[in-house]
Every structure is written in C-alpha cells, then in structure tokens.
C-alpha cells in the first residue's frame, strides 16, 4: 500500500515537473517571439531601402544605438566575407571578418562627427548625432554591397562610393535640411579626398 502511494506521489511529482518545464519553455518562446518579429521588421526595412534608396534615405531610421551598431556590424562583416569569397582568398576572408567592421565603424564615426560639428560651427544648430550616423549607415550600404565585387573589378569601388555620395547629398538636403549647394560641395570634397587616397593606394600596391 505504501509502495503504491509512493509510486503515485512520484508520478504526480514527475507530471507537475514536466508541466513546469513545459511552461518555462513556452514562456521563453513567448519572450523570444517579439524579438524575432522585430528583427524581421528591421530586415524588411533594409530591403525597402534597397528597393528605393534615393527616396528612403530621407526617412528616419527607428533604431537605437545598440541596434544600429549590431546591424551595421553584421552588414560590414557579411560584405567583407563575401569580398573574400569572390574569388576565394583566406586572407581576404579573415580581413573581412576582423578588420572590415572596425574600418567601417571608424570611418563612419569620423564622417558622422565631421557633419555633426559642421552643423554646430557653420550652420549654428544642433543635429542629433545618431540621426547623422543613421544617414551615414544607409548611404554606406550600397558601397558595402558593391565592395563585394571589388576584388574582381577594383574600379567598381569608386562607383559604389559615387552612389553613396549621391545618397549623402540627398539625405543632407532632404533629411537634415542643409542647403543643396552646400551638400554637394561638402560631399564632393570628401569624395575627391577618398578618390585621391584610392589612387595613392593603387599606386603603392603596384610598386610592391
């Protein structure tokens, strides 16, 4: 009799333990589901931008600093690795995985900082740094995509930069309300500087 009672008690204990574990798993799934939906929504937002970048560059990007850094890192790493795979080169893949996101972040923050202080000093108004950084991120995405083919066709890098420069001009004018002429002058100056660095890099590479 005692053995039967113990067996029933053990069975009930296991039953409720299983129910508790199942409830815990279901709760975890419910916690993760909104995050998955949010990631999907952000992915669709990027696709929408890529379909019509000249129009979408002017719309605000509803990303926090953490989300902006995470997505930008993923895009930069993906572009760097793809660049190393076309054609396959283990050193280029390693460079894309480790250094590409670092270089992208440093240059993007420098560019965002340049415009941030330009607005303060010359336009006499404050602009949210994250808003400028979002503009730089979006404008840089086409360049990163084109960069994946730069090992096969090196000059294509300049085409990607030119399109990114065009997006920056549109974004500065329509999103940050900077005079169009000033936007063209500023971005053109930066583009010429980058073009000069690219030419210098290629000359050095041919001498090695």
Image: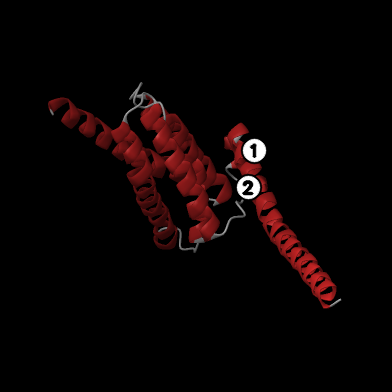
Give the mark toward the camera: 2 or 1. 2
Q: Report whether 59 appears left or right of 84.
A: right
38 vs 50: above or below:
below
Find residue 13 and name its label: none
Q: Where is residue 113 in the image (x, y as percent from the top left)?
A: 39, 57
Q: Position of residue 56 (x, y in %)?
A: 61, 41
68 vs 204: above or below:
below
In depth, the one of 203 and 47 nearer the eye is 47
Q: Is residue 95 visible?
A: yes
Q: Distance between the residues labelled 2 and 1?
A: 10 Å
| Residue identified by numbered label 1 | 48
**Between discs 2 and 1, the one toward the N terminus:** 2
Query: Mark 1 and mark 2 in contact (Cβ < 8 Å)?
Result: no
| Residue identified by numbered label 2 | 42
Neighbourhood count class around disc 1 (C-alpha, 10 Å): few under 14, some 14–19, many 20 upward: few
**Residue at image coords 52%, 61%:** 128
Q: Residue furthest top?
A: 153
**Residue at image coords 52%, 49%:** 71
Helix, strand or loop status at disc 2: helix
């Amino acid at each position: 009799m005692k053995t039967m009672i113990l067996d029933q008690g053990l069975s009930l204990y296991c039953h409720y333990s299983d129910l508790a574990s199942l409830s815990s798993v279901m709760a975890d799934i419910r916690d993760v589901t909104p995050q998955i939906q949010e990631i999907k929504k952000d992915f669709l937002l990027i696709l929408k931008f890529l379909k019509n970048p000249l129009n979408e560059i002017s719309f605000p990007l509803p990303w926090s600093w953490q989300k902006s850094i995470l997505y930008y890192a993923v895009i930069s790493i993906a572009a760097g690795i793809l660049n190393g795979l076309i054609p396959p080169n283990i050193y280029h893949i390693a460079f894309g995985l480790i250094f590409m996101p670092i270089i992208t972040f440093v240059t993007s923050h420098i560019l965002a900082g340049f415009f941030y202080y330009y607005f303060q000093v010359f336009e006499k108004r404050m602009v949210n740094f994250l808003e400028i950084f979002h503009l730089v991120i979006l404008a840089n995405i086409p360049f990163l995509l084109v960069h994946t083919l730069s090992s096969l066709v090196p000059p294509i890098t300049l085409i990607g930069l030119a399109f990114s420069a065009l997006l920056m001009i549109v974004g500065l004018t329509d999103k940050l309300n900077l005079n169009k002429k000033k936007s063209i002058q500023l971005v053109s100056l930066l583009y010429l500087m980058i073009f000069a660095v690219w030419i210098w890099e290629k000359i050095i590479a041919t001498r090695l």
